[in-house]
Amino acid sequence: MTSEPEGPVAVPLGTAATETTPASEVRATLLVEAEVQTPLATGLTLLPTALPVVAFLASAAMLGTAHAFETFGKMAPCNLCLKQREVYWVALTVAGLAIVAGRTPWAQKLRQPFNLLLAAIFLFGAGLAAFHAGVEWKWWPGPTSCVGGSAAVTGDLVAMLKGGAIKAPSCDKAAWVFLGLSMAGWNALASLGLAGISLLAGLRKPLQAQT
């Protein structure tokens, strides 16, 4: 005669969970949750929404840096330098419009086109800056407007009124070099980075669309 055990029977820890949920599914769920909670993944998800602000601040910073070199460093911009500034002015305007559009009922539909447009603008700026850097390295000739055709700054106008000659900066001479790269070279890298971030933001879905 066998006696039945009295009281509850001890069950090994994890047995019930294993019977109801396979271990592979548990591990997969944990991996997915860990990926969602990763700061990098969260940042990439928020990037489409935050990109216009990033582009606006970056463009303003690049323009401020260029004007600081001109004002405090006494480095007059050449024709290609001014064209590179125009790219950032365009990007600044588009980013501002994107920020405003993000507060409208059409924000979801307009977000991706604005981000892709910013990517195209920054990519054009990177190409223009790389072309300027190549002119400085004498890899190819610059446009004819670079020879004596640049805009005059305030100091040049004062010198002209006093009878002095205006010194037009040449596009093929780097006025400033750091770590082997001129301002055009660094601008090419910065614009290329902004283009990559903008393209990534344009190809990703925003947080609201993924949830």
Image (cartoon, helix red, strand yellow):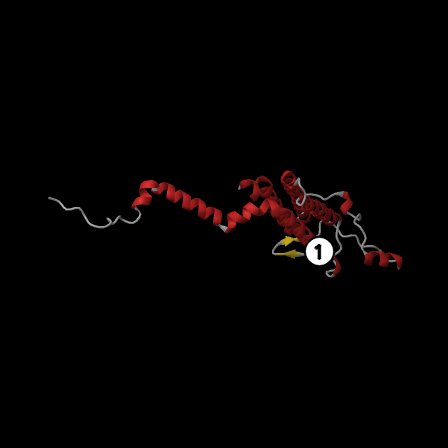
Q: In the displayed structure, does residue 155 sit left or right of residue 96?
A: right
Q: Residue at x 63, y 42 (%)?
A: 115
Determine crowd level at label 1: few under 14, some 14-19, many 20+ residues with C-alpha closer than 10 A.
few
Q: Picture quarter containing residue 119?
A: top right
Give the percent coordinates (x, y) of residue 210: 54, 41
Q: Residue furthest bottom?
A: 72
Using the image as rendered, state which of residue 108 and residue 195 is in the foreground: 108
Q: Secondary structure at mark 1?
A: helix
How far across and down, in percent of the image, does residue 144 sit?
77, 43
Residue carrying label 1: 64
Task: Give the x, y percent position of residue 140.
Answer: 68, 43
Nearer to us in this view, 90 or 184: 90
Q: Residue 18: tell me if it is visible.
A: yes
* Residue 139 appears in the rendering: no
Q: Please, which residue is most extreme toward the left here?
A: 1
Residue nearer the viewer, 105 or 30 = 105
Q: Nearer the viewer, residue 164 or 116?
A: 116
Asked if 52 appears above or below 158 in the picture, the reply is above
Q: Is residue 98 above or below residue 181?
A: above
> What residue do we see at 22% from left, 50% from top?
7
Residue 69 is left or right of residue 13, and the answer is right
Place of residue 185 in the rendered image (x, y in percent of width and height, measured from the top left): 64, 50
Please state which amino acid type lies under the numbered disc 1. Answer: Gly
